Image (cartoon, helix red, strand yellow):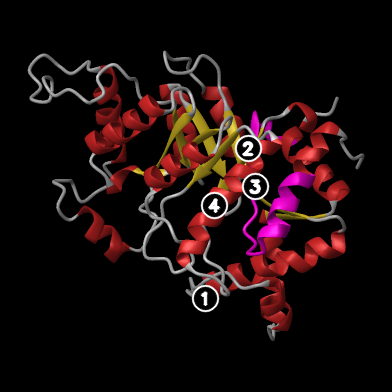
């Protein structure tokens, strides 16, 4: 049995708005995709928090999580993630305890350190919170965990505040990252770690292997669990996958230029007048996108698993064609039942 055949597969979906679609369509497409991959046997489904991006329809992962939980039966559903500096830890604790109370043992609380937006929007999100203008992620994380355990110092003013429902614990915590910081912190406090290889500049092996090597067991997690998030486009043939991935290529090129508009279709990408510099950028960026038919994708996933020792793969397929996206996830999942030789 190959490593891929025994590795849990999960999904990350950002509710991308397509150039030929609308925001509401993007939101409902996420719910539709969740139903589909739940039936395929994927392990978990995460949604993200981004603000002031015309390409992303949802800035409210907790709202989306509730909708997806109601529409599915088996998968765990969570945040990939809640950007903790944007929120009062008490509010995060309340919302996720409510979700856990409604759907016990099916919720994940993934936490991020970045704002998920530009600096002006980040200021608007946080301006009514009494915070240090510096990086206070660690303080907020400690506070969130104290809202769960109730182990406040005897003289702390928050000691008598109860987070409702009081008889529900927070769901499992995950720290998300695209650098080494969250990997080290996840290991130190003994929680799960998810590395965003699909946009990270940091070396994936450094983050994944250092997390595993430095992990300290805790009451929350006895052994390390590292999720590797990958951008993947799979189709019946390499040629069709390349066509579909044109959407991803052009979207990345535009974002590099500061254009965060809706995701282009494959037809728009094929018609775009790329310069030589554009094509060089796309070739470099393809190091973060796995594209191909089943045999090509299987070989690529096996290489990532062998090198990173990931406990789980989380697949992000950011193409606007819903039928092709569903098929991509079908083909990837089928690799576990009948792995394709490299």
Residue 130 horizontal/vertical position (percent): 13, 46
Q: Which mark is residue 230?
A: 3
Q: Residue furthest right?
A: 341
User: Which residue occupies 59% across, 69% down?
Assistant: 251
Residue 168 horizontal/vertical position (percent): 32, 19
Q: Which mark is residue 202?
A: none
In three-dimensional space, the C-alpha distance between marks 4 and 3, rounded to whole angstroms, equals: 18 Å
Q: Which residue is mark 4?
A: 30
In three-dimensional space, the C-alpha distance between marks 3 and 2, rounded to whole angstroms, equals: 19 Å
Residue 266 higher or lower than 342, as above or below: below
The crowd level at tag 1 (other Cα within 10 Å; few <14, some 14-19, many 20+) is few
Residue 74 higher or lower than 121, as above or below: above
In three-dimensional space, the C-alpha distance between marks 4 and 1, rounded to whole angstroms, equals: 27 Å
Residue 258 higher or lower than 238, as above or below: below
Residue 187 horizontal/vertical position (percent): 48, 26
In three-dimensional space, the C-alpha distance between marks 3 and 1, rounded to whole angstroms, equals: 23 Å
Observer able to see residue 174: yes
Give whichever of 173, 303 is nearer the camera. Answer: 173
Give whichever of 38, 258 is nearer the camera. Answer: 38
* Cβ atoms under marks 3 and 2 closer than 8 Å: no
Marked residue nearer the N-terminal end (3 or 1):
3
Q: Nearer the viewer, mark 4 or mark 3?
A: 4
């Amino acid at each position: 049995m190959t490593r891929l055949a025994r590795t849990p597969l999960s999904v990350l979906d950002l509710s991308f708005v397509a150039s030929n679609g609308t925001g509401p369509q993007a939101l409902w497409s996420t719910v539709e995709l969740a139903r589909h991959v739940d039936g395929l046997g994927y392990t978990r489904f995460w949604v993200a928090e981004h603000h002031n991006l015309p390409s992303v329809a949802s800035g409210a992962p907790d709202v989306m999580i509730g909708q997806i939980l109601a529409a599915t039966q088996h998968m765990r559903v969570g945040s990939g993630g809640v950007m903790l500096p944007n929120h009062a830890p008490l509010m995060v604790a309340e919302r996720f305890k409510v979700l856990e109370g409604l759907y016990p043992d099916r919720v994940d609380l993934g936490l991020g350190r970045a704002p998920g937006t530009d600096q002006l929007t980040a200021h608007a999100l946080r301006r009514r919170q009494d915070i240090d203008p510096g990086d206070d992620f660690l303080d907020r994380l400690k506070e969130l965990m104290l809202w769960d355990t109730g182990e406040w110092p005897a003289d702390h003013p928050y000691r008598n505040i109860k987070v409702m429902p009081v008889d529900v614990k927070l769901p499992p915590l995950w720290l998300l990252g695209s650098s080494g910081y969250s990997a080290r912190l996840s290991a130190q406090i003994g929680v799960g770690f998810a590395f965003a290889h699909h946009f990270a500049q940091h070396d994936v092996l450094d983050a994944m292997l250092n997390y595993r090597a430095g992990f300290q067991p805790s009451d929350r997690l006895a052994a390390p669990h590292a999720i590797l998030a990958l951008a993947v486009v799979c189709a019946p043939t390499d040629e069709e996958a390349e066509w579909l991935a044109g959407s991803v290529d052009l979207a990345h090129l535009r974002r590099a230029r500061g254009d965060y508009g809706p995701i282009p279709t494959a037809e728009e990408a094929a018609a775009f007048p790329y310069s030589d510099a554009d094509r060089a950028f796309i070739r470099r960026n393809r190091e973060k996108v796995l594209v191909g038919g089943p045999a090509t994708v299987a070989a690529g996933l096996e290489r990532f698993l062998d090198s990173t020792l990931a406990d789980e793969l989380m697949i992000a397929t950011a193409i606007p064609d819903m039928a092709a996206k569903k098929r991509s996830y079908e083909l990837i999942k089928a690799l576990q039942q009948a792995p394709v030789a490299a």
